[in-house]
Amino acid sequence: MISLNPSGFACSFNSSAIDNLTHDNGGKKEFTANRSRRGRFYNVLSCLHYSEPIKTFWTFTIKEQQTNFEVSDGFYSGQFQKLLKGLTLRYKRAAPNGLKDFVWVSEAQERGNIHFHLVTTTNFLSINYIQNYWNTLVNQDSKNSVDVEFIEQKSIRNISGYFAKYMSKSHDKNFESKGLKDRVIFCRSFGYSRNFKIFDKLTIHRNELLLEFPELEEKKVTKKISEDISIDYYFLDNKKVMDLIKYVDDLKREALGLSKSTQ
């Protein structure tokens, strides 16, 4: 069986072998947790783009050097949530600079400071307004605390990959690594708005997937994670995958509706 994500990312592996994954190679618990978190993120980001193409990529930074990460991460994360809530309320009130659909992720810079990335389908947001709002919330005076890039549609997979690599980092407080960029983040790692439909990943037999994607084996990349375990990765057309997942989702809903009507 193959696990197929809305992003067009699919993988297959030997479940029984992963059950015996040693601690030195990540251990089953850590390995599956990282895969689940990363997979969920891929799902959400792809579903956002499927509902309406992602248009902008934002970065929010802190000017002052951050200390006591266990406390300050929570504070800055809370202020970032206030920003998102305030912009969302503006959208609901049809005010300028309102934010509708988005996905965000937190990470650490080389110097250790937490910062936040945000992608959104919203077209019209004033960077001056957003920056002033952010600076006020975190009590700073900075002319470059917010950056925005417009996303070309052909680069959406690159944006997904850039975001998703941070989802594989450990968020365990006992995690140790060299360099502050890889430090633990003591707050939520990612989140999203609730205005778009989230489609779950699909577990499908290889032969069924081959009917839709005859080029499947040609696009396979195999990664060995231990002596006994390897994972096959496939990168498929995002729109075709989403159409397939939506079709299966519709069938399930129809079946559920029929079952309810016969009760």
Image (cartoon, helix red, strand yellow):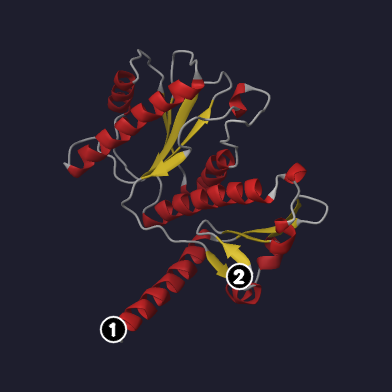
Q: Residues within 10 Å of mark 1 (few under 14, many from 20)?
A: few
Position of 140 relative to 252 (above/below): above
Toward the right, the furthest residue is 227
Q: Amino acid at mark 2?
A: Phe
Give the answer, above or below, for where 115 lies relative to 207: above
Q: Which residue is mark 1?
A: 261
Contact, mark 1 vs mark 2 (Cβ under 8 Å): no
Residue 29's spot in the image, x, y percent?
64, 49
In the picture of the structure, the residue carrying the numbered disc 2 is: 213
- Classify mark 2: residues with Cα within 10 Å, few (<14), some (14-19) or many (20+): some
The answer to whether residue 175 is left or right of residue 62 is right
- Image quarter hosting the C terminus: bottom left
In the picture provided, is 26 more to the left or to the right than 247?
A: right
Type of amino acid under label 1: Ser
Left or right: residue 80 versus residue 45 is left
Q: Position of residue 76 (x, y in %)?
A: 40, 25
Q: Residue at position x 28%, y 83% from top?
A: 261
The answer to which of marks 1 and 2 sits earlier in the sequence is 2
Q: Is residue 120 above or below residue 201?
A: above
Q: Position of residue 193 (x, y in %)?
A: 34, 46
SS assignment at label 2: loop
Q: How many marks?
A: 2
Residue that protrudes farthest toward the bottom in the picture: 262
Where does the N terminus fall, quadrant-wise?
bottom right
Residue 162 is at least partly visible in this image = yes
When asked about the image quadrant of residue 138, the answer is top left
The quarter of the picture where residue 100 lies is top left
The residue positioned 52% from the left and 56% from the top of the image is 7
Q: Is residue 56 visible?
A: no
Locate residue 125, reporting x and y percent: 30, 35
Q: Residue at x 47, y 44 (%)?
A: 152
Q: CA distance from mark 1 to mark 2?
A: 35 Å
